[in-house]
Amino acid sequence: MTSTRKTLLDWWCGQPWLRATYLLGAIMLCVGIVAWSDWSVQERIMGALCILLPLHVFEELAWPAGFPFMMNKLIQKSDQPLAYPENRLTDMITNFGAELLFIAMFALTPTAGNMFVLFAAFFGIGETVVHTIFSIVSLRHYGPMGERTLYTPGFATAWCTLLPVGVFSLHWLVTSGTFVPWDLWGLLCVAFLIGFMIRLPFIISYKIKSTRFAYDSKGYFEKFEG
């Protein structure tokens, strides 16, 4: 007999971590409004990521939501696309963890400098490219079922917010004359985010194949699933 007792982790992986992520973004927005003129360009770039990531998470997981279902079904070919490998636990680790990481990077920016600008360039442009690929895959799959829009949850905030930050970061690195080989260490941050905060939770989740942290809605894709 399977226990239905809810733990603190079950509670946290529901709405609380999402609200905490939004709160951190709102706090960073308030700090940015007050201190923007005192921030360096590098700090402004990382501060912008801290503010914009919660918006991206909101689109993927709250409204219209459904990104995990699409990711599991179309990209990772899961037999339980609401449950694994992406689920409420892995999303909490990846997204709440990323918000904390970005805030820590922002605090360290005066020391790290362009390392994190390079990270922002790869993150903003990379997220947009990936979401565009996912949207093409989704349109091909759901086209016969009525989808007519090149879209998956996260696509809009990637193009409208993360991409401009990424492009500006890359442009500033090229034109400011401040880039040095040491700044390439920013790529290590990219590798850490992809390898340890995104892929590793997915790999472990897929091996366990638990439905404990499953989503209960397909979000944007409900209308195409019938």
Image (cartoon, rainbow, N blue to C red):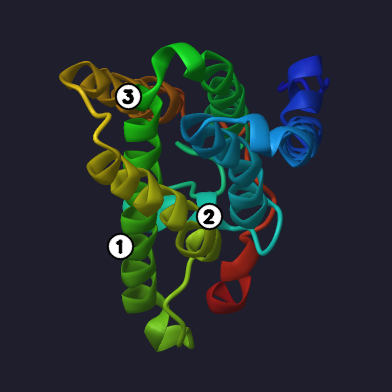
Q: Amino acid at mark 2?
A: Phe
Q: Earlier in the sequence, mark 2 or mark 1?
A: 2
Instruction: Report the residue at 48% width, 63% height from top.
Output: 155
User: In front here: 189 or 145?
Assistant: 189
Q: Quadrant of the C terminus?
A: bottom right
Secondary-structure class at tag 3: helix
Q: Is residue 76 visible?
A: no
Q: Which residue is mark 3?
A: 195
Q: Which residue is mark 2?
A: 67
Q: Does the CB distance between marks 2 and 3 fall below 8 Å?
A: no
Q: Which residue is mark 1?
A: 133
Image quadrant in which you'd find residue 43: top right
Q: Is residue 219 visible?
A: yes
Instruction: Report the residue at 26% width, 45% height from top.
Output: 175
Q: Position of residue 5 (x, y in %)?
A: 83, 20
Q: CA distance from mark 2 to mark 1?
A: 13 Å
Q: Amino acid at mark 3?
A: Gly
Q: Amino acid at mark 1?
A: Ile
Q: Position of residue 81 (x, y in %)?
A: 49, 50
Looking at the image, residue 56 sits to the left or right of residue 192; the answer is: right
Secondary-structure class at tag 2: helix
User: In front here: 188 or 132?
Assistant: 188
Instruction: Report the residue at 30% width, 45% height from top.
Output: 170
Residue projecting furthest to the left: 181
Q: Earlier in the sequence, mark 1 or mark 3?
A: 1
Looking at the image, residue 197 sits to the left or right of residue 91; the answer is: left
Up-down: is 26 above or below 114?
below
Secondary-structure class at tag 1: helix
Q: Position of residue 152 (x, y in %)?
A: 48, 66
Q: Position of residue 198 (x, y in %)?
A: 41, 30
Q: CA distance from mark 2 to mark 3?
A: 19 Å
